[in-house]
Image: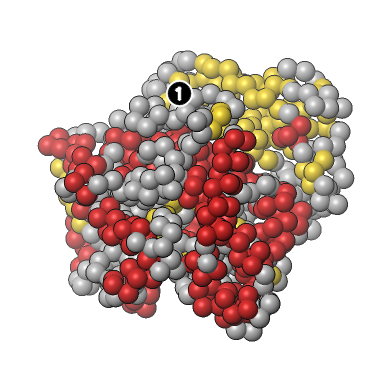
Amino acid sequence: MNRFFTLGALLIGLAGALVAAPAALAQPSPDFIARREAFIDQLMKRMTVQEKIGQLRLRSVEAGPHPDMAGFEKEISDGRVGGIFNTVTRPAIRVLQDAAMRSRLKIPLFFSFDVIHGQRTIFPVDLGVASSWDLDAIRTMGRISAIEASADGLNLTYSPMVDISRDPRWGRNSEGFGEDTYLTSKMGAALVKAYQGDDPSQPGHIMATVKHFALYGAVEGGRDYNTVDMSERRMFEDYFPPYKAAVDAGAAAVMIALNSVNGEPATSDKWLLQDVLRKQWGFKGITISDHGAILELIKHGVAADGQDAARKAILAGTDMSMSDTIYDTNLMPLLKSGKIRIADIDRACRDVLRVKYDLGLFKNPYRDIGAAADDPPDIYAESRLHRPEARKVADESLVLLTNRDHTLPLRKSGTIALVGPLADDQVDVMGNWAGAGRIYQTVSLRQGIENAAGGKVRVLYAKGANVTDDAAMVQYLNQYNPHDVQIDPRSEADMVKEAVDAARQADVIVAAVGEAQGMAHEASSRSDITIPPVQERLLKALKATGKPLVIVLMNGRPLALTWEARNADAMLETWFSGTEGGNAIADVLFGDVNPSGKLPMTFPRAVGQIPLYYNHLPTGRPFDPAHPDKYTSRYFDITNGPLFPFGYGLSYTTFSVSDVKLSAPVMKAGGTLHASVTVTNTGDRDGATVVQLYLNQPMASVSRPVKMLRGFSRIELKPGESRVVSFPITDDDLAFYNQQVKRVVEPGKINVYIGLDSDSVKATSFNRL
Ligand code: BGC
């Protein structure tokens, strides 16, 4: 009865080895596949068409009393629902599964939720975890999320989001892993494996949904839900690999993007959903529409009405419709009128049943729900949280951007003026899509500082400013949750005065500023990526006191921080750092932890430079700062290049990187070459850093990026300690899509760059024969 055979090493343990990943992907054994398909054949023979259509329906049931619970349970027991999302406790889930068990064929429901960066324990937002450049950190988040979600009765999460974005205006950057294809692919695949393990039917595992297929992060102008127009070469080269990596890692589900791709909405794009996803990549799981996306085909202008939209979606390969009745109402008439065939419904139904089978739900529909007697007496119990793991990941996600004259770390003595709208906040620090996390269980920065420095430091707190003083913006942010942004009714002058008075009495100012979590969310694109003006005015007033100014940033996207970079004595990027955020930030502020995070996105100087990303193509007239010529590619009204480059982040210690050594001057086709450097901790404290390998092919049949990340390694060194870091380079790292969109490796010179960010690197080169 061996369920899976493993092509590599160890399974991920449930509690013990939280971060040990399987070395290679487990594949279902041929025997298992045969048994599964035979089971599904038998079941489908007994299903009515209406029951098959029912499997394609994904229904949202929000927490709290449902207005028509009886009617809703009847829909389930009539076999008209395939899966549920947004129900997050075992008692509530059990009621719904009980209804499914009263249906004619007792086909179990699956239960899903947006467990994006944690279920009960909230980790940093994904962009923050990406800043760790530590695959063990993402694995920890994935394992804990799966353990907590399955303990709540859930089977599937709508994560990872691996949409590459080169546009900080897009609000959903916080949910992804940044601008780089390689880093995002590694993070996404590791997260899928951490959720699912080798066998998702095992306790403590859930299934993953990679999203949003495809190209959602490339919406024009960074405006959410906007269109995407992109060459096929760029899709395959830069934007598709992370989705493919997640599929290769075994992701059970794919969520389809809301945007159109070259004029075809992804939801009705047969090329994307069948040719690329199924035929080229061999995907066998379910495709799920995004929220109400099938009906949106009408507004996209490619479907005449609801029935036409349902027809286009099912024919393209959209298996499940999320949160609407569109398949429920329309597939039967479409079948009767011959506009679709039963085979179209069967194909989608089979995908859903297959995932339920793989989850082990046919064997035990209550696999995660358990018996009522075993329900946690208190779902919010402290004992259900995993605080130490969340704190460690948060520690690693913080990025030190500037630190003049060793302003940081702070001493645990004297007086700190702690100011800013985000300093005493428990809502925003959790970030958006905060699972089933609880605000009151979240550690604010103020609490974190008090925990770390307790009686030794006098902390003078003043809010200083609201997160924004723009009433229309507040109204927008609070549209669905009136408590998201809380506005202090005092005048701006009074609040600034209080903060300045505190600053004058203090040795140092710590100002927590940035965005409310709702400003970096779905439907939260910004045309201005600076810190809101009312907070900037506060910072300027604080600066005028002459006291050292430490800026603690909380935000979900790269911000334009030119004034801050010039005027702050130190600046720490903390993203939205989760349940343990305040403790983690305090760890770094006081030097109990030495910061090691690196930026997963380029920080521009101004919004007008966007898109600004490190792995751009060369131009015929590159700008050369050493010889600035007029007729070169630049903006003449701003310093060229980013404020902080991709891969950048400081430490309290210093590191040196030696010249790059190659194992050979040439590489044969199919061969492997090793590039190495010696990294030394040249400072006086323990520290970690991320060594980064970039490649470039300066001459090929098509223009190649000036640099492409192809390896990274996070290392920890004691003062004076050195370590050789070696990266293998193979043809896989050099391959690209040529003019005919064929993946090729071309012989020629390859530049090799190794450094501690994408900008300051040591260089050498070799010839690929
Ligand atoms: C989002 C998805 C999310 C879904 C379900 C949509 O609005 O685009 O990312 O998974 O809602 O909550």
The 10 Å Cα crowd at callout 1, few under 14, some 14 to 19, many 20 or more, is some
Q: Nearer the viewer, residue 762 or 484?
A: 484
Q: Position of residue 346 (x, y in %)?
A: 61, 61
List the residue tagged with mark 1. Answer: 716
Instruction: Give the quadrant of residue 434.
Output: bottom left
Task: Confirm whether residue 650 shows in the render.
Answer: no
Relative to residue 1, is residue 253 depicted above or below? below
Q: Is 207 displayed left or right of 330 in the figure?
A: left
The residue located at (25%, 55%) in the rendering is 91
- Mark 1: secondary structure: strand
Instruction: Give the quadrant of residue 515.
Output: bottom left
The residue located at (44%, 40%) in the rendering is 201
Q: Position of residue 188 (x, y in %)?
A: 54, 44
The residue located at (71%, 54%) in the rendering is 276
Residue lying farthest to the left in this orientation: 455
Q: Nearer the viewer, residue 382 or 373?
A: 373
Q: Amino acid at mark 1?
A: Glu
The residue located at (28%, 46%) in the rendering is 370
Q: Is 414 displayed left or right of 225 in the figure?
A: left
